[in-house]
Image (cartoon, rainbow, N blue to C red):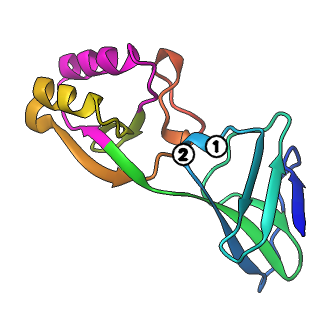
Amino acid sequence: MMLIIERDQKELLVCDGARVDVLYIDWYEVNKTLLTRQTEGGRLVRIHRRVAPALERGVVIYATPEWSIQIEIRPCPVIVLQTDDLNTIGHFCFDVGNRHLPLFWFEDGLALAYDGQLYPALKGQYGDQVILDTRTLSPAFALQAYGQTGDR
């Protein structure tokens, strides 16, 4: 049996003692309007959204008094630029922006999802300032047009 969730609704209340079932998604799926996936507990779920904010880690998309379904964004391999030099950050943003790849802000630098062709080029250009890591890319930390981040 498939559970169909229309998520264009307001925030749901979770009852104390309700079990949490986790729905794992990837960072690039946070804005999808139609998503069919199985939860960690084995429930088949279809999310149908017309217009709604991006799915965030921890958001409850379904709740009953007995159980709820909560979003979890899977960590993924990322390329991180670690520098305080604004000139270097500007060049890096230009290099990545020319490929139309989203950048994410972290306290220790800028990150983007791993790209096997781009990593060697960035490593060659920025040296030890570019590292590989595993992180959760949240829409709240995505850089938007004109340098603004998402709603935090």
Magenta stretch, residue numbers: 79-103
User: 114 or 66, which lies in front?
Assistant: 114
Residue depicted at 71% across the width and 39% down the height: 32
Provide residue 89's location: percent of width, then percent of height.
25, 23
User: 77 or 151, which lies in front?
Assistant: 77
What label sits on residue 27 in the rendered view? 2
Provide residue 74's location: percent of width, then percent of height.
51, 57
Amino acid of disc 2: Trp
Where residue 104 sits, quadrant-wise, is top left
* Position above or below: 149 against 7: above
From the image, tell me which residue sits under label 1: 30
* Position above or below: 58 against 120: below
Question: Can residue 152 be seen here?
Answer: no
* Position above or below: 4 against 94: below
Structural distance between the alpha carbons of marks 1 and 2: 6 Å
Query: Is the C-beta separation of discs 1 and 2 under 8 Å?
Result: yes
Is 81 within the magenta? yes
